[in-house]
Amino acid sequence: MAVVALGMDLTRIDRLQATMDRRGQRFLDRIFTAGEQAYCERRAARRATHYAGRFAVKEAVMKVLGTGWRRGVRWVDIEVTREPGQAPQVSLHGRCAEIAAERGIARIHITITHDDPLAAAVAVGESA
């Protein structure tokens, strides 16, 4: 196993909150899976903070994949999951999974942190 790519992103929590306020559920559905939305909505007091962390992960993973928002990549094809007592993990679907396979990326490790006004994420792509 070797590191093949690294991605990092910072997201301003207040900016994401403003976008959510302006664009509403349509924005959330385009960017976040139903599972991600359920997770963030259960944390009502820090809802925007958790959304911003997941948004930062998606941006960092796109950097690992070398795609940005292009090449048929959909935001919901990158999903952050978290089991109780476990660290967050990322699952790739659709075109994102295909691109990872093409680039020889077998697993992506992530870490998320948030401290108002920022959420940050790092993603590390690892070969098989």
Image: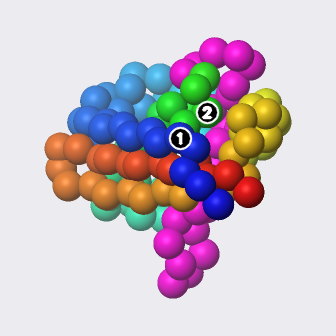
Indicate the quadrant where residue 17 lies: top left
Q: Residue at x 59, y 55 (%)?
A: 2
Q: Say how many tags the image has.
A: 2
Mark 1 sits on what residue? Answer: 5
- Dot 2 and dot 1 residues touching (CB under 8 Å): yes
Left/right placement of residue 58 relative to residue 52 reads right
Q: Circle 1 — which element?
A: strand
Q: Amino acid at mark 2?
A: Leu
Residue 120, given in percent of the width and then of the height, sits at 32, 47
User: Where does the magenta region start and end?
Assistant: 68-89
How packed is label 1: few (under 14 Cα within 10 Å), some, or many (20 or more)?
Answer: some
Residue at coordinates 17% horizontally, 44% vertically from top-left?
A: 117
Q: Is residue 9 above or below residue 39?
A: above
Q: Is residue 74 magenta?
A: yes
The image position of residue 126, as x and y in percent, is 61, 53
**Magenta stretch prevailing secondary structure:** loop
Provide residue 103's location: percent of width, then percent of height: 72, 35
* Mark pair 2, 1: CA separation: 8 Å
- Quadrant of the image for the N terminus? bottom right
Label number found at residue 65: 2
Residue 87 in sight: yes
